């Protein structure tokens, strides 16, 4: 699918050490025949315990000469292999991990560093000691989870926001929203295009995921929503039961109010609901 994405015009490729496909992404980019600077390649740190070693592994796997953007995938230092998760204030804290990422950034082999899944609360803690301001914060963002406070905070700090799951995930209920379908008919677009357009007009970068070649093409077919339509979509989360995450975060999501060993609201600082899922082991 990476090759198909490049063929239809995608230039921003988002991967992670935890996805297991960095080598494949790098191979397709090298084989594309396009200059390296044509692409913006983002990857993510999964192992807070071995920051420098993890970067070396990603750098070698991608084999692209440099990495455009390297993100701390999560603020908590879960050891996925061991199935353990240090508490919020136990070492390595995300501030300690960031300091190690800053050292890698100083080598010049990564053009920018940033974070993912950070709330206002955790950004405020990070910025107290950070020497380098995160270039990007990649978070779940869509009309059910518009991240309004976070958007304004990041804008004020010069941190660009990137939205993952900008249409929700799997059989997303947002795609079936009557308002979204009405706007799709009005503008002659697919419902997904309406949601991606909403994100882009709010100032996000969006990183939709698809294994369907036709949807890859549709995801590039954006439209300029009117101010009234943009505002209408932005109110969907205010309806009862809708201000929530639509993501399946894996087996660490089994316990209500917790995600990968941290409390969703008190530690992660998220102000929306994350429903538990019975999907195996948990921390």
Image (cartoon, rainbow, N blue to C red):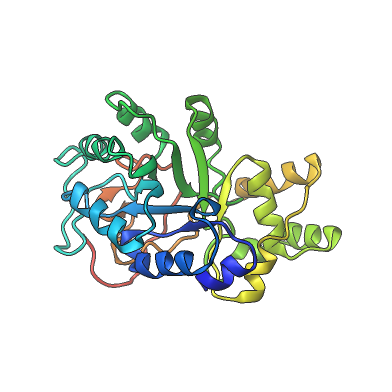
Which residue is rendered at x = 37% and y = 53% of the image? Answer: 65
Which residue is rendered at x = 57% and y = 66% of the image? Answer: 6
Please give left or right for residue 205 compared with residue 101 in the image. right
Q: Is residue 4 something that shows in the picture?
A: yes
Please give left or right for residue 31 compared with residue 107 in the image. right
Question: On the image, which quarter does residue 4 sit in?
Answer: bottom right
Question: On the image, which quarter does residue 64 sit in?
Answer: bottom left
Which residue is rendered at x = 45% and y = 46% of the image? Answer: 138
Please give left or right for residue 102 compared with residue 137 in the image. left
Which residue is rendered at x = 53% and y = 72% of the image? Answer: 3
Q: Nearer the viewer, residue 227 or 182?
A: 227
Q: Position of residue 190 (x, y in %)?
A: 74, 65
Q: Quadrant of the C terminus?
A: bottom left
Question: On the image, which quarter does residue 221 sit in?
Answer: bottom right
Q: Is residue 241 something that shows in the picture?
A: no
- Position of residue 256 relative to residue 95, above or below, is below
Q: Position of residue 34 (x, y in %)?
A: 55, 61
Please give left or right for residue 8 compared with residue 276 in the image. right
Count the labels in the image: 0
Q: Position of residue 124 (x, y in %)?
A: 36, 28
Q: Nearer the viewer, residue 145 or 141?
A: 141
């Amino acid at each position: 699918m990476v090759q198909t994405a490049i063929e239809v015009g995608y230039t921003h490729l988002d991967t992670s050490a935890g996805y297991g496909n960095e080598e494949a992404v790098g191979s397709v980019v090298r084989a594309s025949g396009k200059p390296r600077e044509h692409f913006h390649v983002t990857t993510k740190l999964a192992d807070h315990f071995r920051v420098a070693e993890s970067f070396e592994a990603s750098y070698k796997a991608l084999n692209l000469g440099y990495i455009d953007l390297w993100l701390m995938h999560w603020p908590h230092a879960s050891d996925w292999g061991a199935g353990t998760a240090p508490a919020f204030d136990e070492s390595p804290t995300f501030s300690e991990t960031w300091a190690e990422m800053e050292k890698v950034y100083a080598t010049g082999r990564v053009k920018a560093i940033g974070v993912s899944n950070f709330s206002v609360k955790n950004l405020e803690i990070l910025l107290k000691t950070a020497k380098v301001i995160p270039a990007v914060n990649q978070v779940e963002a869509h009309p059910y989870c518009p991240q309004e406070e976070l958007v304004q905070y990041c804008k004020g700090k010069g941190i660009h926001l990137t939205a993952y799951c900008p249409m929700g995930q799997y059989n997303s209920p947002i795609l079936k929203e009557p308002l979204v379908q009405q706007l799709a008919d009005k503008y002659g677009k697919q419902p997904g295009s309406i949601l991606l357009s909403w994100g882009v007009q709010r100032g996000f970068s969006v990183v939709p995921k698809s294994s369907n070649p036709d949807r890859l093409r549709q995801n590039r077919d954006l439209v300029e929503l009117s101010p009234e339509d943009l505002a209408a979509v932005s109110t969907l989360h205010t309806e009862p039961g809708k201000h929530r995450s639509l993501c399946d975060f894996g087996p660490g999501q089994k316990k209500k109010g917790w995600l990968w060993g941290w409390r969703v609201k008190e530690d992660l600082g998220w102000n929306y609901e994350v429903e538990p899922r019975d999907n195996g082991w948990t921390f």
